[in-house]
């Protein structure tokens, strides 16, 4: 601990006292949480002890600066709350750890540092998965397009631990931030690496974190020591000033210690010696603050101790008063509600007839005047109209702008709407989704593209752990509605193998609250996309819009030249009349003898099998397109199967973990008493070339299964 105030650093007594109070509050809250656990009223003991120096960062910022915080940010939370009159940080933290309904951010769903009124966005991340979101938010604020909900000079702050810095998510986010700064893009982002030298029980090699962070291109590196409060307060103020003024990113490498282990259940003596633990007591940031107060003659040691005791009593009084009076949720609020509550905004006939922007966007030839379109063309037209209908929309991803997408689906969008709304990203799925996560918080309606379904797995936690969880862990106070377009599923000819013909959607169907739609036919895909956008805008839903690659440019259904997979594009004045009800299945072929329930590539496959059954066996087969794979439209499906006693689920995904498992279960649970069978692709990766036919579901197998069900 320094013996005297850092040379040349002025100490503001009021600021230093605020710093001490935040530190004391945080420390005593850690102790109170362990006491509550012993009383069986607390459920979270990962504390901030030793990290209280992060309060200096909060004091350097404004309450209007959005913060995405590490789970050891108790000092920051207390200091930020102290800047906002009427805040109740002690109650907030206690209720959060007690899973209390009075927790102001999550309503008792999880212990998180978050508060809408303090602009602290709740994060449950433990391994830096919130860094891409922070990058995306800073990117959106730096561009300053539209009403972001934050001041024009706002700074985003994002804290994380030294061990988390090794995670691929951190590496990708730091790279994306530096990449953007290197290109001259504004990126008002302050990373704070709170370095206590250890990740649970694994030590960070001495000097490694500094070497890693100090060598980041495009990001300023600023070291600071939590045991030197005068220098830390000055350094934090200076780096925040520079980030705010220059709109350039920086990382504050804050040296901290960790007291009381990783969490309440952690026995530190299993991996640290007693001498090592005791040696770090001298690095206590609160002792450093107390020493500085004494040297500056702001508070005597006795006065500091009295302040310590006052903070203890205040926290413990609040904790004791909670005993026996905590109201808890009987169950978490449902987040997988049926998709029946929202519709696309209506567009008046007069407005669209007189809209010169729409004529200009389509080069004078609106899609409704072009004749029948393919699936790719209809989605392209729908994206044009979406960018016109929702002025806050942005389309982005790898290759979507200049190239117009690998399959031409986004062709012409950049030319019509400019680089501010249609832009290319670097090749990193975590970054693509991070731009969407942050942009949604700043008022945009993102339409990111993941180029292939198999590549989503590089970043699936950005949907599971970040995007879809935000509404749940903020009790609906925050949302990050978006529509993630993904080219996927199998049957792509002449190109592929597993990475371009992935036929598994299990990971998407397992995310609570996520809506998964599959575009199948050019007649219905545009309305389905608009419904996803309405859900994203109006409910903050995270939607995935899956586009079957093999159907993009298909023109025919039964025989060459029949044009059976083309459709006219409806003019905006006809959208409401042609829109299928939200969250419902679609019957694409009527029939009374047998129902083929399917989606995606299974729809044309089932239609061809139904035609063959009619010709060869005089069987009248119904074909039902699920359209929505999550939440599964079970009630709508059962209604669509009225009068049918034989159902074949035609599922192009794998037998294990495929969609058909859920469909069969939904029918059985709903009381369907007829015969049910299913047919799937093989539980295998998809090989290259003709070998793919050995594992992918084929029409012969569908026909054989239908014959068996009929016989």
Image (tube, grey):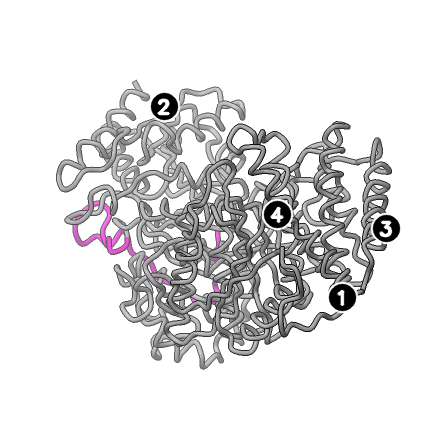
Q: CA distance from mark 1 to mark 2?
A: 81 Å
Task: Find residue 260 and report its horizontal and vertical position in percent.
Answer: 64, 37
- Residue hosting label 1: 296
User: If you read the primary sequence from the N terminus, does the residue marked by circle 2 or circle 4 appear first?
Assistant: 4
Rendering quarter of residue 171: bottom left
Task: Find residue 442 and report its horizontal and vertical position in percent.
Answer: 56, 65
Please rate how many residues cluster around mark 1, counting C-alpha atoms within 10 Å: few if below 14, some from 14 to 19, many from 20: some
- Residue hosting label 2: 677
User: If you read the primary sequence from the N terminus, does the residue marked by circle 3 or circle 1 appear first?
Assistant: 1
Q: Which residues are magenta?
A: 552-580
Task: Find residue 315 and report its horizontal and vertical position in percent.
Answer: 81, 44
Looking at the image, which is closer to me, 675 or 480? Answer: 480
- Residue hosting label 4: 72
Pick out the residue farthest to the front.
3
- Residue hosting label 3: 306
Is 111 on the left or on the right of 313, as rendered?
left
């Amino acid at each position: 601990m320094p013996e005297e105030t850092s040379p040349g650093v002025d100490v503001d007594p009021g600021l230093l006292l605020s710093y001490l109070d935040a530190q004391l509050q945080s420390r005593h809250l850690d102790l109170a949480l362990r006491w509550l656990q012993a009383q069986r009223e607390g459920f979270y003991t990962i504390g901030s002890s030793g990290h209280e120096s992060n309060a200096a960062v909060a004091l350097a910022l404004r309450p209007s600066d959005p913060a995405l915080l590490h789970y050891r940010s108790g000092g920051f939370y207390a200091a930020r709350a102290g800047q906002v009159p009427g805040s109740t940080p002690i109650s907030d933290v206690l209720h959060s750890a007690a899973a209390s309904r009075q927790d102001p951010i999550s309503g008792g769903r999880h212990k998180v540092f978050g508060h809408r009124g303090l602009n602290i966005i709740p994060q449950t991340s433990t391994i830096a998965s919130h860094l891409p979101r922070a990058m995306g938010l800073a990117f959106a604020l730096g561009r300053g397009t539209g009403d972001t909900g934050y001041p024009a000079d706002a700074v985003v702050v994002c804290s994380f631990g030294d061990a988390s810095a090794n995670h691929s998510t951190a590496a990708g986010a730091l790279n994306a931030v530096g990449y953007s700064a290197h290109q001259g893009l504004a990126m008002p982002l302050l990373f704070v690496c709170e370095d206590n030298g250890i990740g649970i029980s694994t030590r960070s090699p001495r000097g490694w974190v500094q070497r890693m962070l100090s060598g980041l291109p495009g990001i300023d590196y600023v070291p600071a020591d939590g045991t030197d409060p005068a220098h830390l307060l000055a350094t934090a103020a200076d780096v925040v000033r520079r980030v705010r003024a220059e709109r350039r990113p920086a990382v504050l490498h804050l040296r901290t210690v960790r007291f009381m282990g990783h969490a309440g259940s952690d026995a530190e003596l299993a991996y640290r010696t007693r001498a090592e633990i005791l040696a770090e007591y001298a690095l206590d940031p609160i002792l450093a603050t107390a020493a500085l107060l004494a040297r500056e003659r702001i508070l005597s040691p006795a006065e500091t101790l009295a302040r310590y005791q006052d903070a203890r009593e205040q926290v413990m009084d609040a904790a004791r008063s909670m005993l026996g009076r905590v109201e808890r949720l009987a169950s978490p609020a449902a987040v997988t509600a049926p998709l029946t509550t929202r519709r696309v905004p209506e567009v008046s006939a007069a407005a669209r007839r007189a809209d010169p922007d729409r004529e200009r966007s389509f080069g004078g030839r609106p899609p409704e005047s072009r004749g029948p379109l393919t699936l790719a063309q209809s989605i392209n037209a729908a994206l044009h109209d979406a960018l016109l209908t929702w002025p806050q929309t942005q389309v982005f991803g790898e290759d979507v702008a200049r190239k117009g997408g690998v399959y031409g689906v986004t062709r012409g969008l950049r030319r019509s709407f400019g680089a501010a709304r249609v832009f290319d990203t670097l090749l990193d799925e975590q970054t693509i989704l991070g731009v969407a996560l942050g942009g949604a918080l700043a008022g945009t309606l993102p339409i990111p593209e993941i180029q292939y379904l198999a590549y989503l797995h590089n970043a699936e936690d950005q949907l599971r752990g970040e995007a879809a969880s935000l509404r749940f862990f903020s009790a609906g106070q925050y949302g990050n509605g978006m529509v993630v377009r993904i080219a996927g599923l199998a049957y792509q000819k002449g190109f592929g193998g597993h990475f371009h013909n992935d036929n598994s959607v299990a990971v998407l169907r397992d995310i609570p609250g996520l809506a998964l739609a599959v575009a199948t036919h050019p007649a219905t895909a545009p309305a389905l996309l608009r419904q996803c956008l309405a859900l994203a805008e109006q409910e903050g839903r995270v939607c995935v819009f899956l586009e079957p690659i093999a159907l993009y440019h298909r023109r025919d259904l039964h025989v060459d030249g029949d044009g059976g997979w083309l459709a006219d594009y409806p003019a905006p004045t006809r959208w409401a009349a042609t829109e299928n009800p939200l969250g419902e299945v679609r019957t694409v072929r009527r029939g009374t003898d047998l129902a083929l329930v399917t989606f995606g590539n299974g729809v044309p496959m089932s239609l061809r099998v139904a035609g063959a059954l009619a010709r060869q066996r005089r069987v009248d087969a119904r074909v039902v397109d699920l359209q929505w794979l999550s939440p599964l439209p079970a009630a709508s499906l059962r209604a669509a199967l009225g009068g049918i006693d034989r159902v074949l689920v035609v599922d192009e995904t794998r037998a294990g973990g495929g969609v058909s498992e859920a469909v069969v279960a939904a029918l059985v649970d709903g009381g369907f008493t007829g015969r049910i069978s299913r047919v799937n692709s093989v539980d295998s990766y998809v090989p290259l070339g003709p070998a793919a036919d050995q594992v992918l579901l084929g029409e012969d197998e569908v026909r054989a299964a239908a014959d068996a069900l009929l016989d």
